[in-house]
Image (cartoon, rainbow, N blue to C red):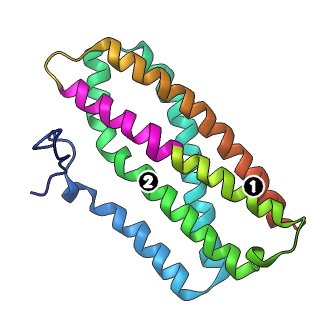
Amino acid sequence: MTELSLPGVFTQAPAGIRLRRQWWILIPILITIMAIKSHRLWFINFVHVFSGGLWTGTDLFMGFMIGPIMRRLDLPARRALIVRLMPRMLFYMPTLAIITTTAGWFMAKQMGFLDIPYPQYWWMIAVYVIVAILTLQGLGIMLPTNLRVYFEIQKERPDGEKIQRWMHTYVRAVAVQGLMQVAIIVVMSRLATGM
């Protein structure tokens, strides 16, 4: 039984985060590798669009559907939801982000978008900036906040004020994340239909 541990913080992860339960993330990673190795544009495009749609849809669903519902739940119900949802989300969202951006890079390279001249190249710079913001927020704010909330809620007496403070930051990050997701769809639509 392989368990995720965070040195200096926890010697053993709560029962919900087990690497062996996350075997399923290997499937989309293998499909992405197959798409890249195939050099078939339709395959790389499919992986990019499908994973990007899942990433954007999940962000928006979590932010605008699950988030408001969780705020209205009492602590035991919120705890039950977080304990079951977070272990999968901790692997699901980074996997989608990695697959979407990796497939997008190879697709842009194959389609020649990395070599377009200025001023059209500004559209690619917009992509880089938006992806950087999404990545920094995801790995620098959202993932650590999810872990803090998850571990706090596992305690016998969780600190509700801490959780509420963290969740306010998280909700703001989700709102910006949603805006960035819409912005990248606009930029991608522009790139896909020509300059």
Residue 146: which quarter of the image? top left
Residue 117: which quarter of the image? bottom right
> What residue is at 67 percent from the left and 50 percent from the top?
130
Quadrant that contains the N terminus: bottom left
The image shows residue 162, relative to residue 34, as above or below, that is above
**Residue 66 screen position, x and y as percent:** 47, 28
Element under disc 2: helix
Element under disc 1: helix
* Nearer to me, 65 or 122: 122
> What residue is at 43 percent from the left and 16 percent from the top?
71
Residue 142: which quarter of the image? top left
Task: Say if residue 46 shows up in the picture.
Answer: no
Q: In the visual, does 39 lie left or right of 144?
A: right
Quadrant that contains the C terminus: bottom right
Crowding at label 1, few (<14), some or many (≥20) Cα neighbours within 10 Å?
Answer: some
For marks 2 and 1, the one nearer the N-term is: 2
**Residue 24 screen position, x and y as percent:** 32, 62
- Magenta residues, as a range? 137-154
Q: In the visual, does 98 lie left or right of 17?
A: right
Question: Residue 186 colored magenta?
Answer: no
Q: In the visual, does 106 lie left or right of 190?
A: left
Q: What mark, if any, has residue 126 been given in the picture?
A: 1
Q: In the visual, does 192 lie left or right of 19?
A: right
Q: Name the chief secondary structure element in magenta.
A: helix
**Residue 70 screen position, x and y as percent:** 41, 21
> What residue is at 63 percent from the left and 62 percent from the top?
49
> Label 2 amino acid?
Pro
Which residue is labeled 2 in the image? 94
The image shows residue 59, relative to residue 116, as above or below, that is above
Foreground mark, 2 or 1, reads 1
